[in-house]
Image (tube, helix red, strand yellow):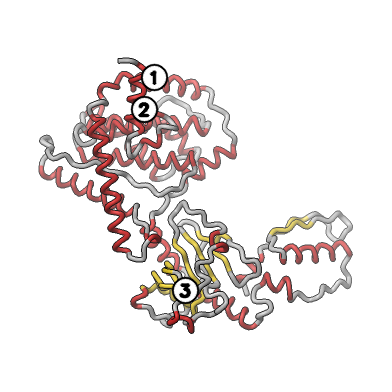
């Protein structure tokens, strides 16, 4: 067989994998070993165990070389210990690597034939591959494991094992369908779930067709896989002795991304958002059972507005004052709220009397993925989006609303900086101090929340000081 053709066939096989094809660009062996485990997990679980262990070894080596981590020793456990010390592996990811390492050793010495556990090892490979993709590429796209389809006959498995395997596969199918749900694209949740199930079943069917076509080819390419592994090992051994120089900023970015949890799908995000609202003191209600007077702050799900549907509408003391957009993770949130005018049309006629500010029907706007949250106060002059760590409490929004009602010319702290600041009493101040104070006030009024004041000795201060101010935090205390 021509070597170039063999390489092309190996490349095609690896890239066609629904779970591991995206890893080919990082390291072909990752896609190849992952694909091998996929193809044999239900027919030869022992072989799948071995391939999963090889996947773990190559992945650990890639983490080591790409982060410039120094490793003392040549064993997989040495690599994992070094990566753990470096902060690349934490908690579940270290445990997953250890399970793959032990599974491969057991498969090599004891010949394991537990198909359900082989499937678990395959999913661990997918989880670690997804982690690697996020750590190296910075991607935050929601993804899910595409499970194999149970063959019509499994003569080596008993009824109990088949039942256990069917249960595991059904769980994976449900998780895949959940990951495809796009609640933001339809006002009917049942319709969104139906679409997601149909889409996930197509993915599984397409993956099964690919597996059936590739299963017969994998044995033919064993020699090419061994050659690739030998070349990779030589390169790794050289770099282990002389780790590549990686800029500390690049290494820190990889570690930070590796430690972040996986992105939430829309269903998971809604659960997280509900918990965040509850922790902030909001009562959560469905639109069919809405009672805006049930508490100081009420968040109504799936609320119909003039332009469609809002994920959550916020009532404060019975008045509509805010809105929350639940976004799919990977959606850029910064700037989205200030630019989004779809809420300008306001509410339906039956809710008009409940709106707090007619000219700005949803004054307090949030966009969240459940992992990150952005907020904009549309009452502010030149309103801008900013990241917040939690939703504001109803009492906070009520205080802002009261301040705005009582001071229409200066409804927020930033507006007061522009229109209502008293004259500076300059008696006893030096000119440098007057300049510093007026300059700081002007900087804050111009929406520059950080300021540097520097004056030489004798100009009114004994030392140079750096002060950081945030008008948003001061505004929150009003």
Looking at the rendered image, the quarter that the C terminus falls into is bottom right
Report the Cα–Cα distance between label 1 and label 2. 17 Å
Per the image, label 1 sits on a secondary structure element best described as helix
Report the Cα–Cα distance between label 3 and label 2. 53 Å
Residue at 26%, 30% in the rendered image = 214
Q: Nearer the viewer, residue 180 or 90?
A: 180
Per the image, label 2 sits on a secondary structure element best described as helix
Mark 3 vs mark 1: which is more N-terminal?
A: 1
Seen in the image, is 443 located left or right of residue 405? right
Q: Nearer the viewer, mark 1 or mark 2?
A: 2
Q: Which residue is mark 3?
A: 314
Q: Can you give x and y, in whole percent of width and height, for residue 263 in the image?
A: 42, 51
Per the image, label 3 sits on a secondary structure element best described as strand
Question: Where is 466 relative to 243, above or below?
Answer: below
Q: Nearer the viewer, mark 3 or mark 2?
A: 2
Q: Which residue is mark 1?
A: 230
Q: Nearer the viewer, residue 239 or 382?
A: 382
Report the Cα–Cα distance between label 3 and label 1. 61 Å
Seen in the image, is 412 located left or right of residue 197? right
Looking at the rendered image, the quarter that the N terminus falls into is top left
Crowding at label 1, few (<14), some or many (≥20) Cα neighbours within 10 Å? few
Mark 1 vs mark 2: which is more N-terminal?
A: 2
Q: Can you give x and y, in whole percent of width and height, for residue 95 in the image?
A: 36, 41
Q: Which residue is mark 2?
A: 11
Residue at 24%, 37% in the rendered image = 209
Q: Can you give x and y, in whole percent of width and height, for residue 389 in the image?
A: 52, 61
């Amino acid at each position: 067989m021509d070597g170039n053709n063999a390489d092309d066939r190996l490349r095609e096989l690896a890239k066609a994998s629904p779970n591991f094809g995206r890893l080919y660009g990082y390291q072909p062996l990752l896609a190849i070993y992952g694909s091998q485990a996929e193809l044999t997990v239900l027919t030869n679980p022992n072989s799948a165990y071995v391939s999963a262990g090889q996947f773990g070894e190559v992945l650990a080596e890639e983490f080591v070389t790409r982060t410039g981590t120094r490793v003392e020793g040549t064993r997989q456990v040495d690599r994992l210990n070094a990566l753990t010390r470096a902060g690349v592996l934490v908690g579940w990811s270290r445990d997953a690597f250890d399970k793959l390492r032990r599974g491969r050793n057991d498969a090599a010495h004891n010949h394991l034939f537990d198909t359900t556990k082989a499937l678990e090892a395959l999913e661990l490979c997918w989880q670690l591959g997804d982690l690697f993709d996020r750590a190296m590429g910075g991607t935050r796209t929601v993804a899910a494991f595409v499970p194999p389809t149970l063959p019509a006959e499994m003569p080596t498995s008993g009824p109990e094992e088949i039942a256990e395997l069917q249960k595991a596969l059904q769980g994976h199918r449900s998780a895949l369908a959940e990951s495809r749900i796009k609640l933001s694209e339809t006002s009917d949740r049942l319709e969104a779930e139906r679409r997601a199930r149909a889409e996930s079943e197509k993915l599984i069917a397409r993956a099964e067709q690919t597996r059936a076509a590739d299963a017969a080819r994998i044995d033919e390419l064993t020699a090419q896989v061994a050659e690739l592994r030998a070349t990779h090992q030589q390169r790794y051994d050289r770099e282990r002795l002389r780790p590549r120089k990686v800029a500390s900023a690049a290494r820190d970015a990889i570690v930070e991304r590796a430690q972040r949890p996986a992105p939430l799908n829309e269903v998971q995000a809604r659960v997280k958002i509900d918990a965040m609202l509850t922790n902030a003191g909001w009562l959560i209600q469905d639109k069919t059972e809405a009672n805006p007077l049930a508490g100081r702050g009420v968040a109504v799900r799936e609320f119909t507005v003039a332009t469609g549907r809002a994920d959550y509408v916020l009532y404060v003391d019975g008045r509509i004052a805010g809105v929350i957009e639940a976004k799919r993770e990977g959606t850029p949130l910064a700037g989205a709220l200030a630019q989004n005018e779809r809420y300008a049309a306001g509410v339906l006629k039956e809710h008009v009397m409940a709106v707090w500010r007619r000219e700005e029907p949803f004054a307090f706007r949030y966009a969240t993925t459940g992992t990150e949250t952005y907020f904009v106060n549309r009452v502010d002059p030149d309103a801008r989006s900013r990241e917040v760590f939690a939703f504001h409490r109803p009492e906070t929004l009520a205080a802002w609303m009261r301040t705005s009602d009582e001071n229409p010319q200066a409804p927020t702290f930033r507006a007061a900086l522009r229109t209502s600041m008293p004259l500076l009493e300059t008696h006893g101040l030096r000119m440098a101090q007057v300049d510093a104070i007026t300059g700081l006030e002007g900087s804050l009024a111009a929406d520059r929340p950080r300021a540097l004041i520097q004056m030489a000795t004798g100009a009114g201060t004994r030392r140079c000081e750096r002060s950081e101010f945030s008008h948003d935090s001061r505004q929150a205390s009003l």
